[in-house]
Image: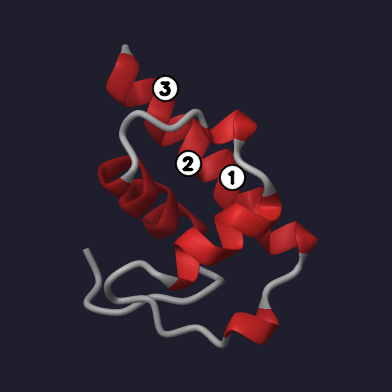
Amino acid sequence: MPATFDWDNAEEIGIQLAEKYPDADPLNVRYTDLHKWVIGLDGFVGDPKHSNEAKLEAIQMAWIEEHNERKA
């Protein structure tokens, strides 16, 4: 796990979200909430203004993958 990460580290963010929110369903999280949760992660150093829909979608997909692996 890297000490710090930003918007371009979708896989790491997906892992961090799965650890911090194990009971959340990534498919039902609004992008506004996802943005807030990402910038609140320990080690996140990205500029909150540098997110966009494509980056949030990549993060959501990585989170879904991690979520599904943990539930299997």
Compute the Cα span from label 3 to label 2: 8 Å
Q: Secondary structure at mark 1?
A: helix
Mark 3 vs 2, N-terminal side: 2
Residue type, numbered disc 3: Asn
Q: Tell me if residue 39 comes above or below residue 68 in the rendering.
A: below
In the rendered image, the quadrant that contains the N terminus is bottom left
Q: Position of residue 33 (x, y in %)?
A: 59, 54
Residue type, numbered disc 2: Trp
Mark 3 vs 1, N-terminal side: 1
Residue at x-position 40% and y-position 70%: 40
Residue 68 is tagged as 3
Colouring scheme, one of rainbow, by chain, secondary structure, one colour: secondary structure
Q: Is residue 65 left or right of residue 15?
A: right
- Confirm or deny contact between disc 2 and disc 1 (CB under 8 A): yes
Compute the Cα span from label 2 to label 1: 5 Å
Residue under circle 1? 60
Q: Secondary structure at mark 2?
A: helix
Report crowding for label 1: few under 14, some 14 to 19, many 20 or more residues within 10 A (C-alpha): many
Residue at x-position 35% and y-position 67%: 41
Q: Name the image quarter holding residue 2.
A: bottom left
Q: Tell me if residue 67 comes above or below residue 42 in the rendering.
A: above
